[in-house]
Image (tube, helix red, strand yellow):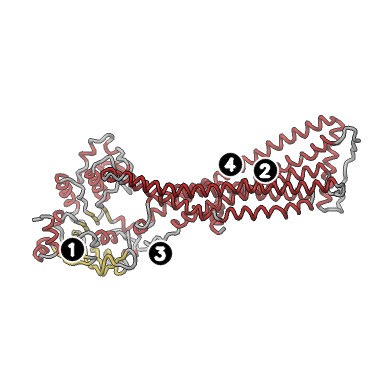
Amino acid sequence: MKNFAIVLRLAANYKFYCALNIIFNIFYAVFNLFTLLLFIPFLKLIFSPLTDTIHIEKPIFNTSLSTPEAYKAYYSAYFEYYMNTMIAHSGKQGALIFICITIAILFLLKNFFRYMAMYYIAYVRNHVVLEFRKKMHDKFIALPLGFYTHKRKGDLVSRLSNDVFDVDFSIMNTLELIFREPFTILIFLISMLLISPSLTLISLLLMPLSALVIGRVNKSLKNAAAKGQSKLGLLLATADETLSGLRIIKGFNAQKQAQKKFDAINQEYTKISTKIYRQRDLASPLSEFLGSLVMVAMVWFGGSLILSNDYKEISGEQFIGFIIVFSQLVRPVQGMFTAWSYIKKGMASYERINEILHSDLKIHEVENANELKKFTDVISYENVCFSYDGVNNVLSNVSFVIPKGKTIALVGRSGSGKSTLADLLPRFYDVSSGSIKIDGIDIRTCKLSDLRALMGIVSQDSILFNDSILNNICLGDDKPDLSRAIEAAKIANAHEFIQQLPDTYYCNIGDRGNKLSGGQRQRLAIARAVYKNPPILILDEATSALDTESEKLVQDALAKLMQNRTTLVIAHRLSTIQHADEILVLEKGSIAERGKHNELLKLNGIYKKLCDLQAFT
């Protein structure tokens, strides 16, 4: 109930539309009641003998008897006076026509108000879901990279799509019932109390019995729904892995293995889904059947009293009218039970969404953070330690400086901590201990936007987006400059192949840039960094995907770009960093060797071995 109250509070942000929905639902409930109550005079008119004497005497309300029974007696007598007057002037046929036209008008008004209520609630439910999607997507962007090392992409996509849809269908779809049915139930109960308090009391004693049975059905629905959504996330993650690795799957003849893995998860999800549907769909027919049993009991009990001639509280036609109203009371009660079963399922999805929304950002910006608009002196790593799991250190007491305009290269075996060291600078992760400072200011005290605005990043895996070449080069710029993009592409040796593409700089490059070759994608990534023109460059083996000819051209371009810029280079191909101002050799998270290229060769240590392995002379 706590989480459901949170969802209702989100809906309360649209008070005006909710208020209109409630008002129109009240009108709907009132006119719905009137359409039923008019059947009482209709029945009386149909079944009363034609020889009955018509009494026409206008009733006078006794103000000293202001009780519900007095009001009931007065309005009943007044309606009878009105009908008798009409019968006297137009006959029973005319009165019947009047009742039928009135009922038709009431049905029209009832359905008009029902539509208007649904019209305004549609705005509320869709905008609450819009907020969920926006908050989820914003959170995905805000969460640190470390969060995604423990999550499957398919499961996250499932939460954004299927879980949000399930909240829409299971919870928001029931807002109309939640806002409407309580008023309907209340108004119907008041009318039943006015017709027969004793029969109403009996009905209220019988109805909770059905509620207990329905509650038992709904109890396990939420847990099953949570398992189902989790399994669906796994299913989507498996499908995503299959699509991403299709070339390898086919190359290793692993199609059957991939199919077997997917089929097993698909079977499990189908089994859970079938159970969920059966449990959820049982609520409606079961509540209807139990409601009908209550109504049958009411018919038997009340009918027995009427037939015994000892019960004078209501007449026969009023009793039938009471049963008609009671039968319609079962529907909103049933609707509430059905809504609750849907809500139970939807809350499981909401909790999965909530898990993302309340995940710790870890990379927090302090209050009154320092502005960092420029870089003027030095970057310093001071006794930096870092651990992904909080137990095993990936980096241990790493200290070095990068003076402005200098190039520092990081080399070492895979897993030595090179990429981690670079990722700490733009605060993709925060150090476990020690500090990183820019011009003497701890980067944890700076605005994240200012810090990252100083840096251009080219990663080993060229990350491109399903958009035009221009928008990929000008990423982060709200007003892309074509002339600047062309200049950046020329520096990155990309302009020539771009000119050969249809639509040139406006050509869409497909999902992850799959319309381009690996070398072309990497050159676009370099052009993106050139376009940003940052004072600090982070190059994570920026030329790894280039052929020999393109590599030389891009290296020349990068050499020009890196002049008077501060550059942190991660190098796997050691030929690319022989002119670095200082080379740091990492071994098991610590700096094992440091110096220029020739100095490290003379040490005849780890760096020399790495060079020999690459036949570097």
Within-10-Å neighbours for mark 3: few <14, some 14–19, many 20+: few
* Of the image marks 4 and 1, the number of the one nearer the N terminus: 4
Q: Are marks 2 and 3 in contact (CB under 8 Å)?
A: no
Q: Are marks 4 and 3 in contact (CB under 8 Å)?
A: no
Do labels 1 and 3 touch, CB within 8 Å? no
Q: Secondary structure at mark 1?
A: strand
Q: Amino acid at mark 3?
A: Glu
Q: Which residue is mark 4?
A: 119
What amino acid does circle 4 point to? Answer: Tyr
Query: Looking at the image, how many numbered discs can be counted on the residues?
Result: 4
Name the amino acid type tagged 2: Tyr
Residue with the mark numbered 2? 28
The mark nearer the N terminus, 2 or 3, is 2
Quarter of the image where one finds residue 315: top right
Instruction: Name the residue rendered at 88%, 41% in the picture.
Output: 58
Residue 20 seen anywhere in this rendered image of the structure: no
Secondary structure, mark 2, is helix
Q: Are marks 2 and 1 in contact (CB under 8 Å)?
A: no
- Residue denoted by label 3: 367
Q: Residue at x 68, y 54 (%)?
A: 209
Identify the residue position indicated by label 1 in the image: 585
Q: Is residue 274 left or right of residue 321?
A: left
Q: Nearer the viewer, mark 4 or mark 3?
A: 4
Q: How far is mark 2 from mark 1, CA to CA?
A: 77 Å
Q: Position of residue 152 (x, y in %)?
A: 37, 53
Residue 332: x %, y % from top left = 66, 47
106 displayed left or right of 490: right
- The mark nearer the N terminus, 4 or 3, is 4
Distance (Cα) linking label 1 and label 3: 37 Å
Circle nearer the N terminus (2, 1): 2
Dot 3: element: loop
70 over 44 or under it: above or below: below
